[in-house]
């Protein structure tokens, strides 16, 4: 998004991407795009029509079950201004909007060093000098250590990601409805989310020690599945069906940067997105914050005020991210608790009356 916005202002950014190509790895579940941030960024990027064509306003529903399979909440309102879009579709729209050869695939960065007022960036067998380096490189950013000593901390919860084809898993489709399903109880949660093209993405979440979470990450999928079956023993059969039938995708321990993470502004270096404010997905703000960052940073980089405008961007970003990060931390704590289902039900009921 940042590259697109800079190109619209006549700049020539380079995107260094470690993936070998756009389809190298699964990109996770569907995203809800908020009007004042994510959708606004698409508007600023001149991509509103492409977004509308790929978005799914019909998939904004919410369902909540208790561990016994009792449906506690069911709301399906396609008039909400937070339409869903698949991550792959959003990424494709943005990639297609860039001029050819903007993205340099297979460029894993292993070193960044100041050099004569600029920065030398390199990897295995290559290096190049850049005036400005922007870390948009996620949780384990290699740019962030040049600005901050903060490191992501494990949040105590691990999600196991699962995939479903609705035609082959109609029971999971019925359970999910049009949108997202939560089943919550005693520090555990099952989540399914309708994606495009007849797919559903699922997550089984449990509280685990970090060492055990890493161990799960090294296990074959069927071993992880067996551990989940034990963890969700006693839950309703239709809920356990999510664990027992889903295609294993991966183990996702949840990490976050400290709430209010910031750094001393340094000319030529800055961050956006998860590299700047990694948080759990339980505020639903990640992609929207990242796209809002891109809008504000593009404006700063094309300002006539020099690097001081980037310092202003950073302060705006800190404040915006801190609110969302606090909400994400509280959301995670509430869901993965002994009274998690009550907290989620209260949250959903409050949204109805907003």
Image (tube, grey):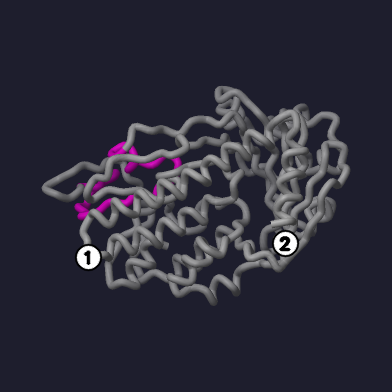
Q: Which quarter of the rendered picture does the N terminus lie within?
A: bottom left
Task: Give the residue pinned by disc 1.
Answer: 304
Residue ID at (27%, 68%): 11
Residue 96 at x, y percent in the picture: 45, 70
Q: Is residue 24 visible?
A: yes
Q: Nearer the viewer, residue 298 or 1?
A: 298
Q: Secondary structure at mark 2?
A: loop
Residue ID at (41%, 39%): 261
Residue farthest along the bottom direction in this orientation: 49
Is 9 on the left or on the right of 31, as rendered? left
Task: Give the residue pinned by disc 2.
Answer: 198
Q: Secondary structure at mark 1?
A: loop
Disc 2 residue crowd, few under 14, some 14–19, many 20+, Cα 10 Å: few
- In the image, the segment drawn in magenta is 120-147
Q: Nearer the viewer, residue 161 or 31?
A: 31
Residue 104 at x, y percent in the picture: 34, 58
First in residue order: circle 2 vs circle 1:
2
Image quadrant where residue 246 sits:
top right
Q: Nearer the viewer, residue 349 or 87?
A: 349
């Amino acid at each position: 998004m940042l590259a697109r916005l800079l190109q619209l202002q006549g700049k020539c950014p380079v995107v260094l991407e470690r993936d070998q190509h756009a389809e190298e790895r699964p990109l996770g579940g569907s995203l809800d795009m908020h009007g004042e941030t994510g959708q606004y960024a698409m508007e600023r990027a001149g991509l509103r029509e492409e977004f509308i064509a790929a978005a799914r306003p019909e998939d904004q529903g919410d369902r909540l079950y208790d561990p016994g399979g009792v449906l506690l909440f069911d709301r399906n309102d396609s008039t909400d201004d937070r339409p869903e879009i698949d991550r792959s579709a959003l990424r494709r729209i943005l990639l297609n909007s860039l001029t050819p050869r903007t993205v340099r695939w297979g460029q894993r960065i292993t070193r960044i060093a100041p050099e004569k007022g600029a920065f030398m960036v390199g990897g295995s067998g290559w290096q190049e000098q850049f005036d400005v380096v922007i870390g948009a490189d996620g949780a384990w950013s290699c740019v962030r250590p040049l600005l901050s000593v903060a490191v992501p901390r494990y949040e105590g919860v691990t999600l196991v990601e699962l995939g479903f084809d609705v035609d082959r898993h109609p029971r999971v489709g019925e359970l999910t409805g049009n949108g997202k399903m939560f089943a919550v109880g005693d520090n555990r949660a099952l989540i399914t989310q309708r994606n495009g093209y007849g797919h559903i993405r699922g997550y089984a979440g449990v509280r685990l020690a970090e060492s055990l979470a890493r161990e799960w990450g090294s296990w074959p999928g069927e071993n992880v599945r067996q551990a989940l079956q034990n963890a969700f023993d006693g839950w309703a059969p239709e809920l356990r069906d999510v664990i027992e039938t889903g295609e294993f995708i991966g183990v996702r321990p949840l990490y976050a940067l400290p709430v209010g993470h910031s750094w001393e502004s340094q000319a030529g270096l800055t961050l956006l997105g998860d590299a700047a404010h990694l948080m759990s997905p339980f505020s639903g703000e990640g992609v929207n914050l990242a796209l809002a960052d891109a809008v504000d940073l593009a404006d700063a980089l094309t300002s006539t005020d020099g690097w001081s405008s980037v310092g202003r961007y950073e302060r705006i970003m800190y404040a915006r991210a801190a609110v969302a990060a606090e909400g994400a931390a509280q959301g995670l704590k509430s869901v993965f608790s002994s009274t998690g289902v009550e907290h989620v039900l209260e949250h959903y009921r409050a949204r109805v009356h907003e």
